[in-house]
């Protein structure tokens, strides 16, 4: 009986935290950290990173780029 009470108490404490971190804290962290990381990357690399970022997001035609001719 004592082990059953410990088990139920364990699940009673674990499940609310699991639900909170999965459905509340996780998405909030993603909303904050992903844009912040991109802004940091753009601030550090300025010109080169911004060109590559724009090219990949907005200017990529879907075709592979031609290999450079030597």
Image (cartoon, helix red, strand yellow):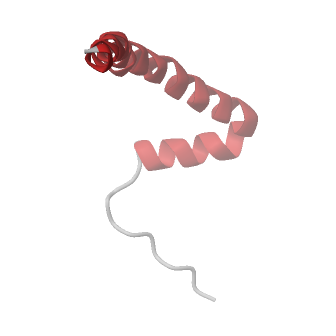
Q: Residue at x 26, y 18 (%)?
A: 4
Residue 13 at what x, y percent from top left? 37, 10
With respect to residue 15, does 45 lie above or below? below
Where is residue 44? Give x, y as percent.
74, 35
Q: Is residue 54 left or right of residue 23?
A: right
Relative to 7, say whether 60 is above or below: below
Name the residue rendered at 44%, 19% in the picture.
Answer: 31
Q: Quadrant of residue 11?
A: top left
Q: Is residue 57 left or right of residue 67?
A: left
60 up-or-down from 1: above or below: below
Quarter of the image for residue 42 reads: top right
Task: Judge from the rendering whether residue 29 lies leftward or rightward of residue 20; answer left or right.
Answer: right
Residue 46 placement (x, y as % from top left): 71, 36
40 or 20: which is nearer to us? 20
Seen from the viewer's position, the closer of residues 46 and 18 is 18
| Extreme residue toward the right, this view | 44
Q: What quarter of the picture does the N terminus occupy?
A: top left
Q: Position of residue 59 (x, y in %)?
A: 41, 48
Q: Please indicate whether residue 48 sits to the left or right of residue 2 in the image.
A: right
Between 29 and 5, the one lying in front of the other is 5
The residue under the point 46% across, 49% down is: 56
Above or below 1: residue 65: below
Report the residue that reaches farthest toward the front.
1
């Amino acid at each position: 009986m004592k082990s059953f009470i410990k088990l139920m108490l364990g699940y009673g404490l674990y499940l609310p935290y699991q639900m909170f971190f999965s459905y509340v804290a996780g998405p909030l962290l993603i909303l904050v950290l992903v844009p912040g990381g991109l802004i940091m990357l753009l601030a550090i690399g300025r010109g080169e990173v911004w060109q590559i970022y724009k090219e990949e997001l907005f200017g990529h035609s879907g075709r592979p780029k031609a290999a450079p001719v030597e």
